């Protein structure tokens, strides 16, 4: 046999766990772990090993146990030995496989977790059960995730909205993202340089970034059923960004079988808005759409964004009719089956086809494609074509 790469062997041992120790040693020779790898092994065993008790023979012990200090140490260990994206996966597995949810109610535990969208979804689902001693810590975790999302999306959304709404006004303020290429090229054709094979412009024209007030009404209607947790987090923060733009009059609504208007809290604090969401329950999309209709005062200047998997528990026929009338009046409607970084969502394909026949595209959208989607909708692009392009980009 060719010589065995010991480091690779140790990696396989970490992946396969204690149960593979004997088989690997017999086949490939001794595969002892380094002290650091032993710590990693213990951290992984707590979640992924099948056994729950130590045998007393030096093998690693699985299980998190009920002790908050022990759990806090485990959380510290995984953040020490694994990268941030891996930590998020391990934490989520701990919640699902080892009942970590209840332990998140302890502040000394919660302050050690890696903040991420999935964790915020879990805290939202525990909203009514978080004790007073933990609420401040929970709020800090949610605030950290909100800040991360805003850092990535806020400036891009601002540029997309203002660029779409001010396409006919030019500004002397230089901003590469707002160059009017068509106007600039047309005005500088006389400056074509044959020797260079290009135009050397005397002047570059930019779209205006002046902010008009309430040019458009944007309505975000979010399904708060448990399966939509990640999408609700992104949707709520996006709604708060919309609300901060004077060019948009924004309404944010969440629904299950009841409807909750979150518009006031979205303008003040998206963290409060997220804690106003109660994940779980049934779904009555028709009821929420009926509620949102009252916000439509100028249909041709209204963008209606539903974030739902379309599993309707209410009156589906009335929902289709209501949305058809909305589209016919001039409202630009779209359905985001998911607003998250996860894979292909589960959704009601039959209802999605009915809405698509009305001209309402139904597609999943990653948060980083949201500014493109928003700008295209406000510019009057064909929404079906826009949805196809975004869906294709997602697959790529």
Image: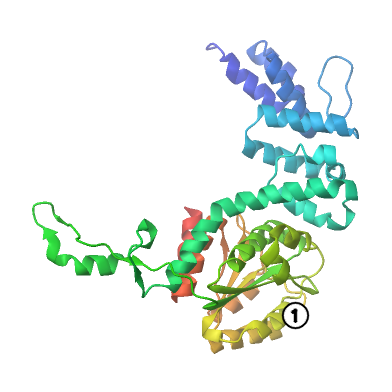
Question: Callout 1: few (<14), some (14-19), or many (20+) C-alpha neighbours within 10 Å?
Answer: some
Left or right placement of residue 269 versus residue 210 in this view: right
Point out residue 72 in the picture as x, y percentages from the top left corner: 81, 32
Point out residue 153 in the picture as x, y percentages from the top left corner: 55, 56
Q: Is residue 383 above or below residue 279?
A: below
Point out residue 358 in the picture as x, y percentages from the top left corner: 55, 82
Point out residue 108 in the picture as x, y percentages from the top left corner: 84, 37
- For the residue pair 7 and 325, the one nearer the viewer reads as 325
Residue identified by numbered label 1: 287
- For the residue pair 59 and 292, the one nearer the viewer reads as 292
Left or right placement of residue 179 versus residue 250 in this view: left
**Residue 384 can be seen in this image:** no
Residue lying at 72% horizontally and 70% vertically, measured from the top left = 264
Residue lying at 73% horizontally and 21% vertically, measured from the top left = 39
Tell me the quarter of the image containing the N terminus: top right
Q: Is residue 108 above or below residue 294?
A: above
The quadrant in which residue 261 appears is bottom right
Residue lying at 87% horizontally and 58% vertically, measured from the top left = 128
Label 1 sits on a secondary structure element that is helix
| Colour scheme shown | rainbow
**Residue 55 can be seen in this image:** yes
Left or right placement of residue 196 versus residue 19 in this view: left
- For the residue pair 388 and 187, the one nearer the viewer reads as 187
């Amino acid at each position: 046999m060719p010589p065995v790469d010991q480091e690779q062997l140790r990696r396989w041992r970490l992946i396969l766990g204690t149960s593979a120790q004997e088989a690997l040693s017999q086949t490939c020779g001794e595969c002892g772990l380094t002290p650091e790898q032993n710590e990693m092994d213990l951290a992984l065993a707590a979640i992924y090993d099948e056994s729950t008790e130590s045998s007393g023979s030096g093998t690693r012990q699985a299980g998190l146990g009920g002790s908050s200090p022990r759990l806090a140490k485990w959380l510290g260990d995984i953040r020490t030995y694994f990268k941030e994206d891996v930590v998020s996966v391990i934490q989520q597995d701990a919640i699902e496989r080892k009942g970590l949810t209840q332990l998140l109610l302890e502040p000394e535990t919660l302050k050690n977790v890696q903040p991420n969208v999935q964790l915020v979804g879990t805290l939202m689902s525990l909203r009514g059960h978080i004790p007073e001693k933990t609420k401040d810590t929970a709020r800090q975790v949610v605030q950290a995730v909100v800040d991360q999302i805003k850092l990535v999306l806020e400036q891009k959304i601002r540029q997309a909205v203002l660029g779409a709404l001010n396409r006919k006004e030019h500004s002397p303020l230089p901003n590469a993202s707002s160059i009017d290429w068509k106007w600039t090229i047309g005005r500088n054709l006389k400056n074509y340089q044959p020797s260079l094979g290009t135009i050397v412009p005397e002047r570059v024209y930019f779209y205006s970034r002046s902010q008009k007030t309430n040019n458009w009404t944007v309505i975000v209607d979010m399904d708060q059923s448990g399966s939509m947790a990640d999408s609700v987090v992104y949707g709520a923060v996006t709604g708060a960004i919309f609300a901060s733009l004077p060019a948009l009059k924004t309404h944010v609504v969440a629904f299950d079988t009841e409807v909750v208007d979150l518009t006031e809290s979205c303008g003040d604090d998206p963290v409060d808005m997220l804690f106003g969401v109660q994940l779980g329950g049934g779904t009555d999309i028709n009821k929420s759409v009926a509620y949102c209709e009252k916000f439509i005062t100028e249909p041709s200047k209204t963008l209606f964004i539903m974030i739902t998997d379309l599993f309707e528990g209410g009156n589906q026929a009335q929902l289709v009719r209501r949305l058809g009338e909305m589209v016919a009046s001039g409202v630009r409607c779209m359905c985001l089956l998911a607003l998250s970084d996860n894979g292909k969502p589960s959704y009601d394909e039959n209802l999605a086809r009915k809405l698509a026949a009305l001209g309402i595209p139904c597609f999943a959208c990653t948060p980083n494609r949201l500014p493109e989607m928003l700008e295209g909708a406000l510019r009057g692009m064909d929404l079906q074509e826009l949805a196809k392009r975004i869906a294709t980009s997602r697959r790529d």
